[in-house]
Image: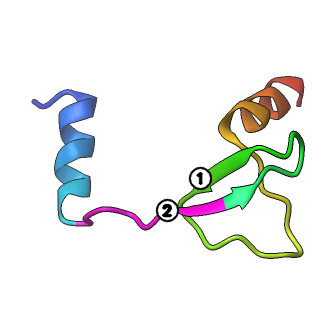
């Protein structure tokens, strides 16, 4: 049986690289790289701000 990391790697191998998009974090104003095309009507957060918001919720 494969470990979780090996299963995930095998599952994602066929998918290929995801295109990353740059956006401005709505919280700190820093650069956020996200795997989806940002929309003007939705806020985007950098990894640090997103993690802080998850902890507070």
Q: Residue at 62% x, 73% y: name it.
A: 37
Q: Position of residue 31 (x, y in %)?
A: 69, 48
Left or right, residue 27 beside residue 32: right
Q: Nearer the viewer, residue 38 or 55?
A: 38
Q: Position of residue 1 (x, y in %)?
A: 10, 30
Q: Along the horizontal axis of the image, is 7 left or right of 42? A: left
The quadrant the C terminus occupies is top right
Residue 54, picture quadrant: top right
At horizontal 70% and vertical 70% (from top left) the residue drawn is 38
Question: Which residue is outermost to the front?
Answer: 30
Q: Position of residue 52 (x, y in %)?
A: 80, 27
Q: Residues within 10 Å of mark 2 (few under 14, many from 20)?
A: few
Give the main secondary structure of the magenta stretch.
loop
Q: Neighbour class for label 1 at 10 Å: few (<14), some, many (≥20)?
A: some
Q: Is residue 21 magenta?
A: yes
The label on residue 49 is none
Q: Secondary structure at mark 1?
A: strand
Q: Disc 1 and disc 2: Cα gap in Å? A: 6 Å
Location of mark 2 (residue): 20
| Residue 33 pos. (x, y %) | 59, 53
Classify residue 31 as left or right of residue 28. left
Residue 10 among those drawn in magenta: no
Give the residue pinned by disc 1. Answer: 33
From this view, report whether residue 21 is shown above or below residue 47: below
Against 4, is 20 above or below? below
> Magenta region: which residues?
15-22
- Confirm or deny contact between disc 1 and disc 2 (CB under 8 A): yes
Q: Residue at x 77, y 75 (%)?
A: 39
Query: What SS does tag 2 mark?
Result: loop
């Amino acid at each position: 049986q494969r470990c979780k990391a090996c299963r995930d790697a095998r599952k994602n191998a066929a998918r290929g690289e995801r295109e990353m998009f740059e956006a401005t974090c709505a919280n700190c104003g820093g650069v956020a790289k996200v795997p989806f095309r940002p929309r003007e009507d939705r806020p985007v957060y950098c990894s640090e701000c997103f993690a802080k918001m998850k902890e507070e919720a």
